[in-house]
Amino acid sequence: MKIALFGSTGQIGQSILRTLLTKTSHEVVQLISPQSESTARSINKQFTAEQQSRLSTESVDILSCSTDDLVHYLINVEIIISALNGKALQAQSKIQDAGAKAGVRRFYPSEYGMHHVYRPPGDEVGYLHPMWNTKSAANEACLHHPAIKSGSMTYTLIGCGDFYNQSREEIWCPWTNPHASEYTLHILGDADATIDFTHIDDLGEFIVGTIKHPERSENRTLNFVSDRISYNEIAQLLERYSGKKVKKTVYPISLMDEVWKDKERVPAEVKGKGAFPDDFWILVKGMQGAGRFWRPPGEVHNGEFGMEGRTFEWYLRGLSGGGYEGRTPALGWNSWNAYSCDIDADKIVTAANEVVNLGLKDLGYEYINIDDCWSVKSGRNTTTKRIIPDPDKFPNGISGVADQVHALGLKLGIYSSAGLTTCAGYPASLGYEEIDAQSFAEWGVDYLKYDNCGVPTNLTDQYTYCVPDSTDGSNYPNGTCVDLTDAAPTGYDWATSTTAKRYQRMRDALLSVNRTILYSLCDWGQADVNAWGNETGNSWRMSGDITATWTRIAEIANENSFYMNYANFWGYPDPDMLEVGNGNLTLAENRAHFALWAMMKAPLIIGTPLDSIDTSHLSILLNKPLLTFHQDDVIGRPAYPYKWGYNPDWTFDPEHPAEYWSGPTSSGEVFVLMLNSEDGVKTRTALWGEVPELKSKNSKEEKKGKGFKVTDAWTGKDVGCVKDKYEVKLQAHDVAVLVVGEEC
């Protein structure tokens, strides 16, 4: 497919161009003005040789050239995307005329913002800024073009919120400058008003999503919103992640009317400091403060294309200097399942070297985590109160190991507990959170696993939360706790529980140090951690400990299948570390264990000695399709069960978890997993009409008698065009994982 892009040298156009070249395999021709040639050359340098081979650049003055001149550039083009703004919008209709003559089948008018009319008190007509009027008129003309009316061309008009990451508008988007000594937010009206915001890159990715799904997007006006948030909430996040003072200058909403009548009334502190006219920004901010700059949820279409927006919190975490660690689930190795307490520096460094040598690092595995038993057991330093690394196990301290791990391009993790002692009886961090966080930061630690052992009786919860887990010594009918005698009253906020507060204290301590440390909560699902885990850490254990037995793996998978709605960017329920390569698990059970954990987007933390790992087990850990799904940087949600198979849907069965799962990807493919939870060979069948992500596709394609291209995720084999269903025989406790691609 060939796509023509107009306006590619602007800030929005650059993002669209980058997304088209990095997220698709399409050819792109960018048509630029002669004045923008040097800018285009500079932009093009960022692309790889392969991407540049799909990009061509044509210089043309769209305002002065004729329609026939433009036709020449649009031959064999299937889609036109306009990212034009300002005066250039006058040529948008001409471009569409040329596209119609050249046989272009689809047109994307320039994106639009929030075109609500503002009405001052007593004004029944109201007004829009001329910039908005120009774009609105240009886009309206496109939607009523003769080619659209005749059906020879379709359109997709995309709306969005206020672009919040425009660095050229630092006065209104001060958070785009990470080097500022302090920040000032300029607000009109209500600082608590909810506002729609969009990250520029999200717009490009949303466009790509609509291109991949014409059946859902042709001849539609669609809206994408990355975040809905108020300026007061932004100020809190900015202060939290930057560690800098945030001021708020709040102007009365009446300023909007004053500036509309007299542009000289723009406050001096913002006057002339934006790329767009002052009165434009005053109108935008005024409409935001008036509560007019948002769309009802039914008018936002992110979910139709499986997209998650880049939220303000995601963005501000990156600006704080910590990057975007923790946005996707962690990948790494941990010492406990491999060695328990029998650890030392050599074993940790050996594991790190093997992560590199075995190709695991190349696929994203990065954390090398020291578990329990790393310190002097007798107690802390009596003067500094710091935990003391065991000099026999770690003669160069934890920092010495960190240096070696970092030299390999990897990251180091460590372990403690929200109690007085760890699970193995070593000093833990309760009451010493700030001291220990500072020690971890100084040593170069990048990850903290925080357990739930050694809790004194005066800091246990007054109520017990139902964790339907065999490690609690009970059997729970369909996931309920009928014998629970000290349950919390209805409506109890577990985020205020003593357990939550113990974990929040370490969170606050980690945020106070000058180092990004990923925070892995290990409270075994207690105190309804799903309700507060995401605001506290990057992942949270939802059950008791795993063992290298199929019975336990199936039990945890069953429990976690009911928590998938809690998993998304920055926060993931954790079904515990991997047992791949351990115990007497069959190869099928190892495969099913890894695939389920990957599809659930659980942290994938290897727990086997890597210097002696079997090649068949290593190949499971190196499965590129599953890791690509797991680490998708556009879609944060995991796969969901869509059919239980062995049981009626929504059955809680520790022996037979949900057997049919599916999840979308940013590449447009759909992953489908089928599990045989039974003890003998069984047939499992994926019906396309039952897979949620394929239903809308299939309803259209059934009429054509077509299906979908399918690839086996384990073998990489192209299965071909599969119509209606995919049937497979599976060994006991084995899985099939399908990558379902385009329609065929």
Image: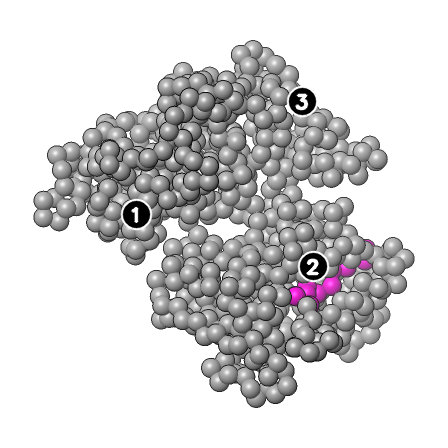
Crowd class of label 2 (few under 14; some 14 to 19; many from 20; radius 10 Å) = many
Q: Tell me which label, 2 or 1, sits earlier in the chain.
A: 2
Residue under circle 2?
A: 158
Judging depth in this view, the residue of 467 and 89 nearest the camera is 467
Residue under circle 1?
A: 505
Q: Is residue 292 visible?
A: yes
Q: Distance from label 2 to label 1 (Cα)?
A: 44 Å
Which residues are drawn in magenta? 104-115
- Looking at numbered disc 1 in the image, what kind of residue is underneath it? Arg
Whole-percent x and y of residue 253? Answer: 56, 75
679 on left or right of 532: right
Between circles 2 and 3, the one closer to the viewer is: 2
Residue under circle 3?
A: 685
Q: Examine the rendered structure and indicate whether residue 668 appears above or below residue 19.
A: above
User: At 67% across and 51% down in the image, what residue appears?
Assistant: 298
Q: Examine the rendered structure and indicate whether residue 130 appears above or below residue 239.
A: below
Whole-percent x and y of residue 146? Answer: 88, 63
- Looking at numbered disc 2 in the image, what kind of residue is underneath it? Ile
Whole-percent x and y of residue 572? Answer: 46, 40
**Quarter of the rendering occupied by the C terminus:** top right
Q: Distance from label 3 to label 1 (Cα)?
A: 48 Å
Q: Tell me which label, 3 or 1, sits earlier in the chain.
A: 1
- Looking at numbered disc 3 in the image, what kind of residue is underneath it? Thr
Is-magenta flag for residue 110? yes
Labels 2 and 3 touching (C-beta < 8 A): no
Helix, strand or loop at mark 3: strand
